[in-house]
Image (cartoon, rainbow, N blue to C red):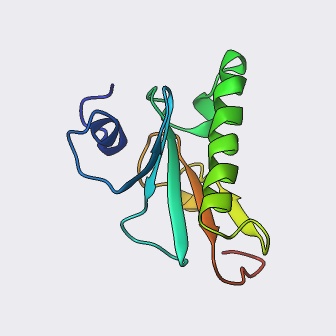
Amino acid sequence: MAEECLFCKIWAKEAPAKEVHRGDDVLAFEDIRPVAPVHILVIPKDHIPTIKDLKPEQAPLLLRMIDLANQVARDRGISRDGYRLVINQGPQAGQSVYHLHLHVLGGRAMHWPPG
């Protein structure tokens, strides 16, 4: 756990979050500033600052994050019409918390390009 990391604190239940699902090594919770009717964040237990810090041996963890994102989409009723999965890398992409996280966005039409 990184001492000053908000998502590490959420994992440790030292900071509040509206949890959607908690597994052994992945957690889903509602984003506090949603940009869509459904906006859930999926994080790993391990503190991995960015997607580029993910090691090849951690690939199964990324798959578990995606599996949970798909489960959340089904549970929230957005899987049929579609949803977007987003991982931001760095400040120009909009990453504001440096703990790997996956955004699950849905419940409205998404536009392209997203920026």
Picture residue at 69% right of the left edge, 15% below the top:
57
Find the residue positioned furthest to the left.
Answer: 14
Quadrant of the snapshot with the C terminus:
bottom right
Residue 95 lies, in percent from the top left, at 50, 54
45 with respect to 93 (left or right): left
| Residue 83 in picture, x, y percent from top left | 72, 67
Placement of 18 over or under 34, stated as above or below: above
User: In screen coordinates, is 74 left or right of 81?
Assistant: left
60 versus 30 height, above or below: above
Q: Residue 58 at x, y = what percent? A: 65, 21
How many tags in the picture? Answer: 0
Q: Residue at x 46, y 26 (%)?
A: 46
Nearer-the-camera pick, 33 or 49? 33
Name the spot of residue 24 as percent of width and height, x first: 48, 26
From the viewer's perspective, tell me whether residue 96 is left or right of residue 109.
Answer: left
In the drawing, does residue 93 fall left or right of residue 114? left
Q: Quadrant of residue 33?
A: bottom left
- Image quarter of the N terminus: top left
Q: Residue at horizontal 65%, vertical 69%?
A: 77
Which of the 4 image quadrants contains residue 14? Answer: top left
